[in-house]
């Protein structure tokens, strides 16, 4: 699946997008797999309350099922003004 990173998440991880082979059942499981990779991923995902997630371009929560998913995106909360 494609995993996309935006804003400060991208800055901490060091790239905007990557292909990930995973057996994760949920977004939360995927996050745990990513955090175990390297310190930069651990830092980027240290506080899930500071992140939002989209699954196949639809806002989702971290318990969202990943069956058949092609894309997961992580980004900070959006603010309006």
Image (cartoon, grey):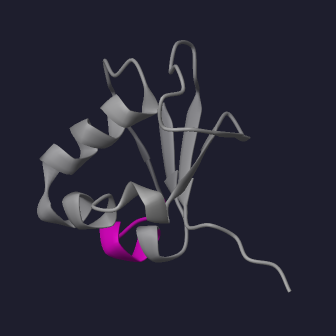
Q: How many marks?
A: 0
**Is 41 located above or below residue 3 in the figure?**
below
Outermost residue, top side:
67
Q: Which residues are magenta?
A: 10-16
Q: Residue at x 48, y 29 (%)?
A: 63
Outermost residue, right side:
81
Query: Is 49 positioned to the left or the right of 29 in the image?
Result: right
- The image quadrant where one finds the C terminus is bottom right
User: Residue 45: percent from the left, percent from the top?
Assistant: 32, 58
Outermost residue, front side:
49
Question: Which residue is more in the foreground, 4 or 32?
Answer: 32
Q: Residue at x 34, y 62 (%)?
A: 47
Q: Residue at x 32, y 65 (%)?
A: 44
**Is 79 located above or below residue 44 in the figure?**
below
Q: Quadrant of residue 38?
A: bottom left
Q: Quadrant of residue 40?
A: bottom left
Query: Is 5 positioned to the left or the right of 45 in the image?
Result: right
User: Residue 62: percent from the left, percent from the top?
Assistant: 48, 37
Question: Which residue is more in the foreground, 56 or 27?
Answer: 27
Query: Is 50 positioned to the left or the right of 52 in the image?
Result: left
**Is 27 located above or below residue 54 in the figure?**
above
User: Residue 78: percent from the left, percent from the top?
Assistant: 70, 70
């Amino acid at each position: 699946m494609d995993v996309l990173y935006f804003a400060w998440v991208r800055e901490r991880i060091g790239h905007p997008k990557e292909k990930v082979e995973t057996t994760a059942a949920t977004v939360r499981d995927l996050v745990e797999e990513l955090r175990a990779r390297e310190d930069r991923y651990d830092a980027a995902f240290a506080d899930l309350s500071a992140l939002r997630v989209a699954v196949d371009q639809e806002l989702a929560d971290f318990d969202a099922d990943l069956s058949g998913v092609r894309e997961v995106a992580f980004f900070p909360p959006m603010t309006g003004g």
